[in-house]
């Protein structure tokens, strides 16, 4: 079964600093990988996704992520964090295969706190 | 184009009561997914539906939980005889097409509290 691990439960950075959120996945085939952001009390918004091709993908709000097959990782990065980036970030992998083409498997999330 | 709508946003039920959560997908979307987020956990897949069909319910608890997506109207997630452990945020997502590459658009969630 596929799984996603986000090793960091909580990360604190200063505004303007660079950011990297880690994501490791376990999946038998070529995965479809996603990063979502969730602000308090809100639903999830898609930041970026990887299906194939260029392993460095650009997303919204200045985020990017790099797919590294050899490390089974899909880390999210941002060169300079803004206070408005404070939120919870989820890495997800899909599909599950078989008939479950829509199922996403999420990591447990990383809470980002931004200090002024 | 309105996004995915869920109601109610907050729902309080006493143990043993029924909870009905509604989800209206984005216009034109015929694929609906339900996820549950327990406190301090990530989202867990529950069920995937198309109009009038349950495609994958591998994440649904075997008892008390059911879901439907009728030809007309919203998708409904129904929890009978709720228990305290059902307290969670329930998110609905929809997509235009079938397949893992299609983006799932999430609603704001329904936060269920069982007292």
Image (spheres, coloured by chain):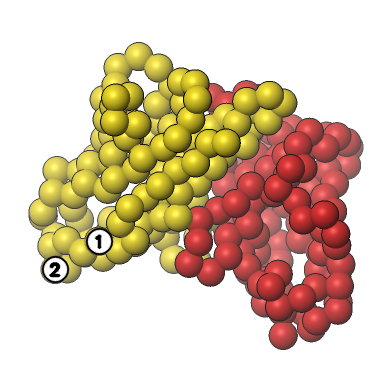
Chain colours: A yellow, B red
Establish whether labels 1 and 2 are both on one chain.
yes
Farthest-out residue, top: A53
Residue occupying image coordinates x 35% and y 14%: A53
| Residue named by callout 2 | A116
Nearer to the camera, B12 or A104: A104
Q: Note whether A71 is above or below B83 in the view shown.
A: above
Number of the label disc, if any, that sits on residue A75: none
Q: Residue at x 62, y 25 (%)?
A: A97
Q: Residue at x 68, y 57 (%)?
A: B6
Element under disc 2: loop
Chain label for disc 2: A
| For residue B8, above or below residue A34 | below
Q: Quadrant of the N terminus of chain A?
A: top right
Is A16 placed above or below A57 here?
below
Q: Is residue B52 left or right of residue B13?
A: right
| A42 vs A94: above or below | below
Residue A32 rendering spot, x and y as whole percentages: 47, 27
Q: Which corner quadrant of the image does residue A58 belong to?
A: top left
């Amino acid at each position: 079964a596929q799984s996603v691990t986000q090793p960091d439960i909580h990360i604190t950075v200063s505004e303007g600093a660079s950011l990297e959120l880690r994501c490791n996945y376990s999946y038998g085939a070529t995965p479809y990988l996603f990063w979502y952001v969730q602000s308090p009390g809100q639903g999830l918004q898609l930041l970026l996704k990887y299906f194939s091709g260029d392993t460095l993908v650009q997303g919204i709000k200045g985020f990017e992520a790099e797919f590294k097959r050899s490390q089974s990782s899909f880390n999210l990065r941002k060169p300079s964090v803004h206070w408005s980036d404070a939120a919870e970030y989820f890495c997800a992998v899909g599909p599950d295969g078989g008939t479950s083409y829509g199922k996403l498997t999420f990591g447990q999330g990383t809470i980002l706190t931004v200090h002024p | 184009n309105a996004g995915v709508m869920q109601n109610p946003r907050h729902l309080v039920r006493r143990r043993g009561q029924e909870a009905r959560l509604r989800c209206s997908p984005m216009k034109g979307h015929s694929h609906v997914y339900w996820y549950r987020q327990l406190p301090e956990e990530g989202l867990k897949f529950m069920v995937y539906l198309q109009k009038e069909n349950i495609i994958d319910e591998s994440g649904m608890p075997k008892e008390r939980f059911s879901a439907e997506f009728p030809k007309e109207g919203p998708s409904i997630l129904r929890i009978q005889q709720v228990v305290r452990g059902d307290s969670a945020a329930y998110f609905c997502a929809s997509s235009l097409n079938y397949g893992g590459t299609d983006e799932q658009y999430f609603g704001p969630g329904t936060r269920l509290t069982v007292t």
